[in-house]
Amino acid sequence: MAQSQELALGIDLGTTSVKVVVISTQSKQIVSKQSKDTQANVPSDLGIEGNKQDVPKILSAVHSCVSRISRDLLRQVVHIGICGQMHGVTLWDHSAQEDDDDLEEKFKLEIPKEKVSPLYTWQDSRCDPEFLAALPKSKSHLPTHSGYGCATLFWFAKNKPEKLSKYNRCGTVQDLVVALLCGRSKVAISTQNAASWGYFQTEEGCWEIDILAENDFPTKILPSEIMKPGQSAGLLQYTWFGIPAGTPVGVALGDLQCSVYALLKNPTDAVLNISTSAQLAYVDPFFTPKLTTGTETIQHFPYFEGKYLAVAASLNGGNCLATFVKTLQQWSMELGFSIPQSKVWEKLIALGSEDAAISELEILPTLLGERHAPEQTASVNKITLDTLQLGQIFRALCSGVIKNLHDMMPLEILQKAGIQRIVGNGSGFVRNLVLQKEVQRWYELPLEIGQSGDAAFGAALAVINHN
């Protein structure tokens, strides 16, 4: 029989998938992990301007991942840490549950579809520059962009107030998970997730209620309990796949912060994450919101223990490469050939890794624009007869993803901050040798591929280290 040990469960609700890990509180090693694509995207009535996901499908993916972990392990869980995609907002109707003696036996992480809105994600672009410019001026050091929770709620208040009237709570989707697990009436939100919504004073730890209320914002549904990262949001209300009722559940965290937390070993490291989007970040010990505002392309988000992350967050990462792969696959089908996406990826990476793939071709892959330049589009330059090989095009595309990040956070910024190494992570990066080569070309710093770098691991680690 396996020896008893204390374990922590970490859950990451990502943009495309849910990841779950179980780690030892002593060794900090992963003892079990599961993942599942959510397939939660749903069509928006706004077309490409809207981006939303089906919340019950996300919850179902969490349920599925946890259910596949050994009950013997889950019975030893003493902490639960949760994180997820930042900026987005979901709304729900909280009504008191009736007492049910059998609920503990049949508890399932779910909420009736009629009681929850879609998750309006960080990729939502319904708030165009004109709309954002008309919003009240915030005193926060962090600007408010489309896809940020408060911007989305402002949009609904001004354009579809009847949608808001159906709900009495809101939060990130990871805040909803914490509320369901703990049976919370009041919504708890960490400073990490609150700051990602806009209209939040990070030093004071509070919403800009006066500014919001004066401009017809639905302040009554904002999360009412602000917590520091690492704090417990409550206790597990019912036994869940063997995890004992009463297990502490940490307040939900941002996936970016948890990814960095899992990887950062030295203060002289920067962390590069490329999955759906792309972020380059390092801990800035000298940042103070009242004294420093950063640059237009670098923002400072709350981290842990009162510190801030300096972040260049690009909307364009693995999603742009995936779009290129899907396009090639579609062209092949139109020509009468069916090629699996895995084969397309394999061939592109092989061709792009060759020295012959280096060319003068330049691709700016900003298909989604950027938060600091929402109307920017993608472009291709320096096309010649000698730059049309498939390997050259893919190499230029990968180079463009990294150059775009480099334009946002240049090497000089990292050098000034004393950064000596980049630790890379993310599904879009670890398996792509071409991206790795371009990071070293643009940043001229040692590159290490991170181990155990999933945000789920960081979420578990955070609740262990802060309890």
Image (cartoon, helix red, strand yellow):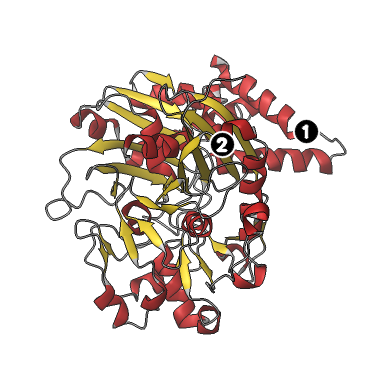
> How many numbered circles does the render carry?
2
Residue hosting label 1: 340
| Residue 222: % across, % down | 39, 70
Kindly state the secondary structure of the residue where label 1 is placed: loop
Q: Is residue 79 visible?
A: yes
Residue at (40, 39) in percent of width and height: 258
Type of amino acid under label 1: Pro
Q: Which quadrant would the C terminus be assigned to in this image?
A: top left
Pointer 2 local density, CA inside 10 Å: few below 14, some 14–19, many at least 20: some
Report the residue at 51% width, 43% height from top.
Answer: 12
Q: Is residue 188 above or below residue 390?
A: below
Q: Amino acid at mark 2?
A: Arg
* Horizontal arrangement in the rendering, residue 8 relative to residue 294 (left or right): right
Does 200 sit above or below residue 312?
Answer: below
How many C-alpha atoms fall within 10 Å of the one at disc 1: few (<14), some, or many (≥20)?
Answer: few
Circle 2 residue: 75
Residue 209 on image: x %, y %: 28, 74
